[in-house]
Amino acid sequence: MGGDKFPPMMSLLVTFALILGGIFFSLWKTRGEAAPATTE
């Protein structure tokens, strides 16, 4: 890589994109399903 550092802002954007992608994927996969009943 020639000793160049990866830009910190790009690293943050990738991290947030992965987190948001996981959230949206989870919401998409569970849409239309009933919430699990909690019995306490």
Image (spheres, rainbow, N blue to C red):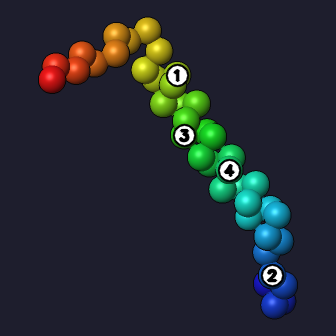
Q: Residues within 10 Å of mark 2 (few under 14, many from 20)?
A: few
- Quadrant in which the C terminus appears: top left
Q: From the image, tell me which residue sits under label 1.
A: 28
Nearer-N-terminus badge (2/1): 2
Sequence-wise, which precedes: disc 1 or disc 3? Answer: 3
State the SS at label 2. loop
Label 1 sits on what residue type? Answer: Trp
Q: Position of residue 11 (x, y in %)?
A: 74, 64
The x, y position of residue 30, in whole percent, is: 43, 20
5 over 3 or under it: above or below: above
- The answer for how far apart the CA atoms under marks 1 and 4 are is 18 Å
Can you tell which mark lies on residue 5? 2
The reply, left or right, for residue 26 in relation to residue 21 is left
User: What is the number of the mark on residue 22?
Assistant: 3
Q: Tell me if mark 1 has few (under 14), some (14-19) or many (20+) residues whose alpha carbon lies within 10 angstroms of its own.
A: few
Which mark, by number, is residue 16? 4
